[in-house]
Image (tube, helix red, strand yellow):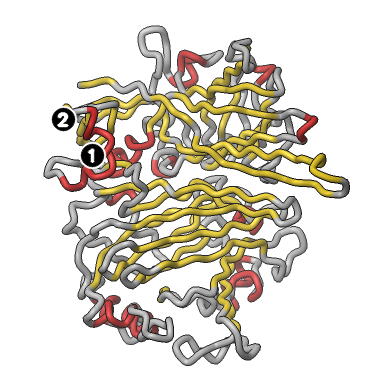
């Protein structure tokens, strides 16, 4: 364990710049720049659309994996390689795809007019063979992209061309990863989830593939086709043979943010992506083919650095995914709620566990459940809340717990979160318009106040569910390395509040939405 005692004057600055020190491990960069980004939520459900933005602030070309992950069980629904030229910005929008073949089962679709190179080329990536489509029960409209209009750099015989204007590329999300896992296989699962961005390496913008990704005076990359050909398998392209060719280690400098818009409601809120910096040693190259599960957060460095006031502590683990999880480990999450009927107010908490999928297949710590079709991988939690004058409702209290329960086989006397993305809907208002697949209701005793969700086993009605007792208050919810033992669960999220004001003037209704990061506490033990 290494402890770095800092003056208060420099502690805050080091939290965002610690990558410059020799001993620093992987860390959350509170300045928002990093090698990996976690967007906690996207939605194309019930009139929502989500705009996402990814920016390369450096003077190098970046190879970046973009991965969309559905919210029930963290199954990948779309991924591609994105090649960002220096100071490049890529953006896209996630909509409900109304062109699908099955009524009520439309999937989400990514739509972009951005010209930055992707492999496969968005809007051109063919989904499956005819036989595979029959086997999966999907149609061309479900899985195949299209582009309007085509241009020489992206032209393909199957493109749809409607003449002039911007190039619009549409790429539907798919259910390939979960179609055979026994869980719900419907396309509507693709409508909600979170987004993972991982830097795979850097390229020289003045040479070879880096120059191909560079934008010319017309705002178009020099040759996206060369990057696609490099990944071709028949005949094998340069990257298909050696993914490291012309690619150097990561340097960070990525940032991202998303905004969720509901046009019918007239509301919008924005959320920054969480930035993980120093994910690699700066020499390791993670460049991998599109359409694979690589790169992965599990390939991260095994040492993490966490900050507690003026103290930065390094902890080394046996596995990179444990180091990533340690950055998100919390024992409580707290925030305000407002459900005042006179304001038509709603509050929803979005809680995402971005590493849960790496643990629940085998029920590994810090998670306590093993995934199965019947029971999913539910984690019991407790909820306590207060009004704004310190009135207090003690938890745990199953009568004030989450409702309705998910469709799972559980006899737990506590409220449970069973999905990778969980929406806690206060008082049944569902201002976020989330689906019942990932939504859990909580009915507070007050119209305004604040609440605290606890992952501490001793706070449950039945602590033995997580192996906790008086001498071991967290039970199996621990993650130990050389440095610290982290207690709780790896989670990140934000609260969304919406209100309506119809008193501005006659006939005018004003809707407002805002988002704020959930406040967290940690309870880590030095080794």
Q: Is residue 374 above or below residue 262?
A: above
Q: Comparing marks 1 and 2, which lies closer to the viewer?
A: 1
Q: Is residue 364 above or below residue 64?
A: above
Of the 4 image quadrants, the one containing the C terminus is top left
* Label 2 neighbour load within 10 Å: few <14, some 14-19, many 20+: some
The residue sitting at the front extreme is 505
Residue positioned 75% across, 55% down in the render: 264
Residue positioned 50% across, 63% down in the render: 78
Q: Is residue 373 visible?
A: yes
Q: Give the x, y percent position of residue 239.
A: 28, 76
* Label 1 neighbour load within 10 Å: few <14, some 14-19, many 20+: some
> Is residue 46 or residue 59 the one in the foreground?
59
Q: Which quadrant of the figure has residue 416?
A: top right
Q: Is residue 165 above or below residue 505?
A: below
Q: Is residue 185 visible?
A: no
Q: Which quadrant of the figure has residue 255?
A: bottom left
Q: Which mark is residue 14?
A: 1
Q: Which quadrant of the figure has residue 87?
A: bottom left
Q: What kind of element bears circle 1? A: helix
Residue positioned 37% across, 25% down in the render: 522
> Is residue 162 or residue 253 the one in the foreground?
253
Q: Which mark is residue 490?
A: none
Query: Label 2: which residue?
Result: 4
Compared across the picture, whether 138 is left or right of 154 comes to right
| Label 1 with label 2: CB-CB less than 8 Å | yes
Could you tell which of marks 1 and 2 lies nearer the N-terminus? 2
């Amino acid at each position: 364990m290494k402890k770095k005692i800092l003056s208060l004057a420099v502690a805050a600055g080091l939290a965002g710049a610690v990558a410059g020190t020799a001993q620093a491990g992987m860390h959350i960069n509170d300045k928002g720049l990093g090698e990996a980004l976690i967007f906690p939520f996207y939605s194309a459900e019930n009139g929502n659309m989500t705009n996402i933005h990814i920016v390369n602030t450096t003077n190098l070309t970046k190879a970046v994996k973009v991965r969309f992950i559905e919210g029930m069980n963290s199954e990948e629904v779309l991924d591609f390689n994105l090649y960002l030229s220096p100071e490049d910005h890529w953006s896209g929008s996630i909509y409900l795809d109304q062109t699908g073949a099955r009524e009520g089962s439309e999937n989400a679709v990514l739509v972009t007019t951005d010209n930055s190179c992707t492999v496969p080329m968005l809007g051109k990536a063919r989904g499956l063979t005819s036989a595979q489509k029959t086997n999966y029960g999907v149609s061309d409209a479900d899985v195949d992209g299209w582009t309007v209009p085509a241009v020489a750099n992206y032209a393909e015989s199957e493109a749809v061309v409607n003449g002039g204007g911007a190039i619009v590329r549409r790429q539907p999300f798919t259910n390939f990863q979960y179609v055979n896992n026994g869980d719900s296989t419907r396309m509507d699962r693709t409508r909600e989830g979170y987004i993972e961005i991982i830097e795979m390496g850097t390229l020289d913008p003045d040479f070879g593939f880096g120059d191909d990704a560079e934008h010319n005076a017309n705002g178009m990359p020099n040759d996206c086709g060369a990057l696609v050909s490099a990944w071709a398998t028949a005949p094998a392209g340069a990257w298909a043979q050696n993914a490291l060719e012309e690619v150097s280690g990561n340097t960070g400098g990525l940032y991202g943010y998303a905004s969720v818009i509901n046009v019918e409601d007239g509301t919008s809120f924005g959320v920054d992506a969480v930035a993980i910096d120093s994910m690699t040693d700066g020499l390791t190259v993670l460049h991998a083919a599109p359409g694979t599960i690589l790169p992965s957060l599990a390939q991260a460095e095994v040492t993490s650095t966490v900050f507690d006031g003026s103290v930065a502590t390094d902890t080394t683990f046996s596995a990179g995914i444990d180091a990533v999880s340690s950055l998100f480990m919390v024992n409580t999450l707290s925030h305000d709620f407002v459900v005042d009927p006179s304001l038509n107010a709603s509050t929803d908490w979005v809680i995402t566990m971005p590493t849960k999928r790496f643990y629940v297949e085998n029920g590994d710590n810090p998670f306590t459940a093993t995934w199965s079709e019947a029971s999913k991988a539910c984690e019991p939690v407790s909820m306590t809340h207060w009004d704004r004058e310190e009135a207090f409702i003690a938890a745990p209290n199953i009568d004030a717990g989450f409702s309705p329960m998910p469709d799972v086989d559980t006899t737990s006397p506590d409220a449970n979160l069973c999905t990778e993305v969980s929406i806690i809907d206060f008082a049944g208002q569902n201002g976020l318009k989330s689906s019942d697949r990932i939504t859990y209701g909580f009915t507070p005793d007050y119209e305004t106040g604040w609440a605290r969700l606890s992952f501490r086993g001793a706070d449950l009605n039945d602590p033995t569910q997580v192996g906790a007792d008086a001498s071991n208050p967290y039970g199996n919810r621990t993650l130990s390395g050389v440095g610290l033992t982290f207690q709780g669960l790896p989670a990140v999220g934000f609260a969304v509040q919406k209100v309506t004001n119809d008193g501005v003037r006659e006939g005018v209704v004003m809707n407002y939405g805002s988002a704020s990061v959930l406040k967290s506490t940690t309870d880590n033990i030095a080794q």
